[in-house]
Amino acid sequence: KSAMADGAGAVADFRCELAIDAYSKILSHAVKYPMRPVSGIIIGTEGKDGATTLEDAIPLFHSYPMGPMLELAMMQVEEYSKKKEKKIVGCYWANELLDDHSIHKTAKRIGAQIAKYFPKACILLVDNKRIGKDKKTPVVAAFLGSDGSSSVPLAGPPEKDLDSLHKEPLKSKIVDFDDHLDDLSADWLHQSA
């Protein structure tokens, strides 16, 4: 079943705003590992207007995460976000198959866990088929973090930012937590977009 085409409906009083830095990292992570499931955490803030601002993405895995490794990564992300005076506001997932538009059960579990602490958490699902083809709108869709069942309105980065993002090749040097476990000198938390 396709989550992207699911008619579950958008939640009216719930919306997310995606910053270009977070979007760039999500795309870079998906492009670096096109044949693997990729996932990460999104940090940001809740605005005065109630919108969740997705400011930064922290790449975690290019494999299906194991419980202990996910827990260890989440503890470090939590500390990092506190230092940045941000909250963990969601997660992202890109499936390993181009035609798979479903939200993986792991992404749903991560989203549900985040929603326990941040009720307006969201899950971003990358549409791998649109990467590199759709340069005017984000190639991600947002869903409720609590269960991934309903779509959430997503305001993407301004079109001028999307244009500038696509003028240069996406960064393949993005480092995720999996990479860090292979090479402890690889800094997966402090990366520019």
Image (cartoon, helix red, strand yellow):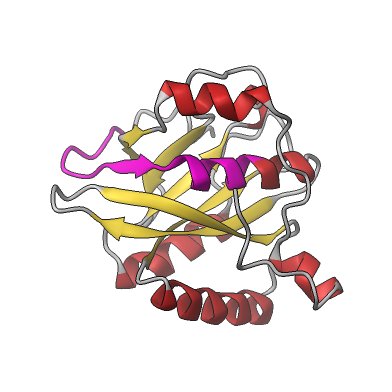
Residue that appears at 32% across and 50% down: 53
Residue sitting at x 27%, y 35%: 10
Q: Nearer the viewer, residue 169 or 121?
A: 169
Percent position of residue 4, x then y: 48, 31
Is 41 displayed left or right of 70 in the figure? left
Against 74, is 122 above or below? above
Left or right of 165 on screen, residue 152? left
Q: Residue furthest right?
A: 182
- Is residue 30 placed above or below 121 in the rendered structure? above
Residue 160 x, y percent position in the rendering: 45, 22
Say left or right for 42 vs 177: left
Q: Quadrant of residue 180?
A: bottom right
Image vertical order of residue 9 relative to residue 87, above or below: above
Q: Is residue 37 magenta?
A: no
Give the mark count: 0
Look at 74% across and 56% down and name the residue there. Answer: 62
Residue 134 image position (x, y, % from top left): 58, 18
User: In the image, which residues are magenta?
Assistant: 8-27
User: Could you tell me which quadrant the N terminus lies in?
Assistant: top right
Q: Residue at position x 73%, y 42% from top? A: 171
